[in-house]
Image (cartoon, helix red, strand yellow):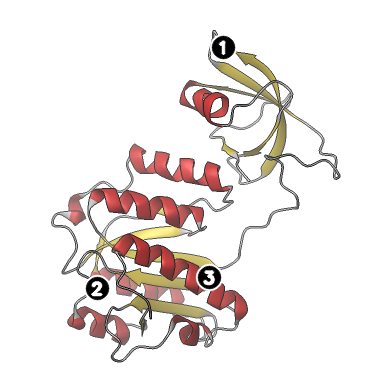
C-alpha cells in the first residue's frame, strides 16, 4: 500500500495543499486524478484517507480533502484494515560500506520497518565514516520515498556514526532493564565457528521489546570484533547460504530475524 507522507497537518477545513517535488510524486509517480483516494501519513503518525479534489497543472499544486471511508470500498491506496505500529523496536547496526551500498541498505531497511539505523565505524568499514553526514537531506529523502513506496508506518531514522565500543554501550544501556526473553542482539558472521542459526537465536526470545542486528561492511567483521560483540551481549549467527554482499546480508538478516521472532 503506497502512502503520501506529509510534513504539515491538515487545516481546520480538512484540506491539505501539496506542491513542489511532492506534486510531481503524486502526479507523475502515483498518477493521481481528481476523485482518487490516497492514504496520507500525518506528522502525528496517523494514517488519514483523503480524496484528490483539485489538480492545478499550471500552479503545480494538488489539493486533498479528508474523506469518510466506506468499509467495503477498497482502492490501491486505501488501507484494508486498521494499522498499528509494532511495539518491538528494531535497530540495525550497520558497519559503514561504500556510499551507494549504504543508500540501498537505508532504503531496504526502511521498507522493512526498521526503527533506526546506527552507522558504525569498524575495522573494515569505509575510511572517514565518522565524518559523514548521516542526517542529511539526501537520507531524509531516501527514507521518505521508501516509506511512501512501501506504506511503512514506522518513521525510520538514522543516528550519528559510532565506533564499535559506543555501539555496544548504546545497546547495553538501552536494554539493561530488560530480561533475556525481551531482547535479542545478533551479529552476522561469515564464519561458522562459535555461531548459531538465526532461528536458534530467535527461539530464546518470547516477548521481544528490543531487537538489534549487527551487519558488517565489505570484508565482513574481524574475529576480534566478533569476540568483543559477543562479550557485549550479541549472539554470533551464521547464514547457511551463499556468500552475500553486505547490502544483501543486511536485508536477508532483517527478514530472517523478523520472521524468526514472529514464529517464536
Q: Is residue 234 above or below residue 212?
A: below
Asked whether, in this view, residue 167 is left or right of residue 113, the answer is: left
Give neighbour class at mark 2: few <14, some 14-19, many 20+ (Cα, 10 Å). Answer: some
Q: Which residue is mark 1?
A: 57
**Percent coordinates x, y for residue 38 in the rendering:** 67, 34
Point out the tag, 3 or 1, that comes first from the N-terminus. 1
Asked whether, in this view, residue 255 is left or right of residue 241, the answer is: right
For this orientation, the residue located farthest to the top is 58
Give neighbour class at mark 1: few <14, some 14-19, many 20+ (Cα, 10 Å). Answer: few
How far separated are the C-alphas under marks 3 and 1? 43 Å
In the image, 198 versus 45, the foreground residue is 198
Q: Is residue 170 visible?
A: no
Point out the tag, 1 or 2, that comes first from the N-terminus. 1
Residue under the image location 56 percent in, 28 percent down: 26
Asked whether, in this view, residue 113 is left or right of residue 239, the answer is: right
Q: Report the mark closest to the observer, 1 or 2.
A: 1
Residue under the image location 75 percent in, 52 percent down: 81
Q: Residue 197: name its quadrant.
A: bottom left
**Percent coordinates x, y for residue 216 in the rendering:** 27, 68
Could you say whether the residue bearing mark 1 is in a helix, strand or loop?
A: loop
**Percent coordinates x, y for residue 31 in the rendering:** 59, 27
Q: Is residue 161 visible?
A: yes
Could you say whether the residue bearing mark 3 is in a helix, strand or loop?
A: helix
How far separated are the C-alphas under marks 1 and 2? 53 Å
Residue under the image location 54 percent in, 7 percent down: 58
Q: Which residue is mark 3?
A: 258
Q: Which residue is mark 2?
A: 165
Q: Is residue 219 above or below residue 203?
A: above
Q: Residue 96: name its quadrant.
A: bottom left
Say the numbered circle drawn on residue 31. none
Amino acid at each position: 500500500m503506497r502512502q503520501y507522507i506529509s510534513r504539515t497537518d491538515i487545516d481546520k477545513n480538512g484540506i491539505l495543499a501539496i506542491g513542489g517535488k511532492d506534486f510531481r510524486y503524486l502526479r507523475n509517480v502515483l498518477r493521481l486524478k481528481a476523485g482518487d483516494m490516497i492514504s496520507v501519513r500525518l506528522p502525528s503518525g496517523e494514517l488519514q484517507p483523503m480524496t484528490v479534489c483539485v489538480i492545478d497543472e499550471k500552479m503545480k499544486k494538488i489539493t486533498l480533502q479528508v474523506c469518510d471511508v466506506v468499509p467495503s470500498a477498497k482502492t490501491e491506496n486505501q488501507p484494508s484494515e486498521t494499522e498499528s505500529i509494532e511495539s518491538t523496536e528494531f535497530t540495525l547496526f550497520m558497519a559503514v560500506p561504500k556510499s551507494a551500498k549504504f543508500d540501498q541498505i537505508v532504503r531496504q531497511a526502511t521498507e522493512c520497518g526498521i526503527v533506526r539505523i546506527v552507522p558504525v565505524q569498524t575495522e573494515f568499514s569505509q575510511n572517514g565514516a565518522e565524518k559523514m553526514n548521516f542526517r542529511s537531506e539526501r537520507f531524509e529523502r531516501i527514507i521518505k520515498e521508501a516509506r511512501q513506496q512501501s506504506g511503512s508506518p514506522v518513521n525510520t531514522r538514522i543516528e550519528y556514526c559510532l565506533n564499535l565500543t559506543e555501539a555496544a554501550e548504546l545497546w547495553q544501556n538501552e536494554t539493561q532493564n530488560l530480561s533475556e526473553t525481551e531482547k535479542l542482539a545478533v551479529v552476522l558472521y561469515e564464519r561458522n565457528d562459535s555461531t548459531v542459526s538465526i532461528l536458534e537465536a530467535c527461539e530464546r526470545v518470547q516477548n521481544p521489546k528490543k531487537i538489534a542486528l549487527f551487519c558488517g561492511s565489505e570484508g565482513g567483521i574481524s574475529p576480534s570484533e566478533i569476540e568483543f560483540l559477543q562479550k557485549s551481549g550479541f549472539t554470533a549467527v551464521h547464514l547457511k547460504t551463499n556468500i552475500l554482499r553486505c547490502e544483501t546480508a543486511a536485508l536477508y538478516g532483517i527478514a530472517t530475524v523478523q520472521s524468526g521472532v514472529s514464529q517464536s
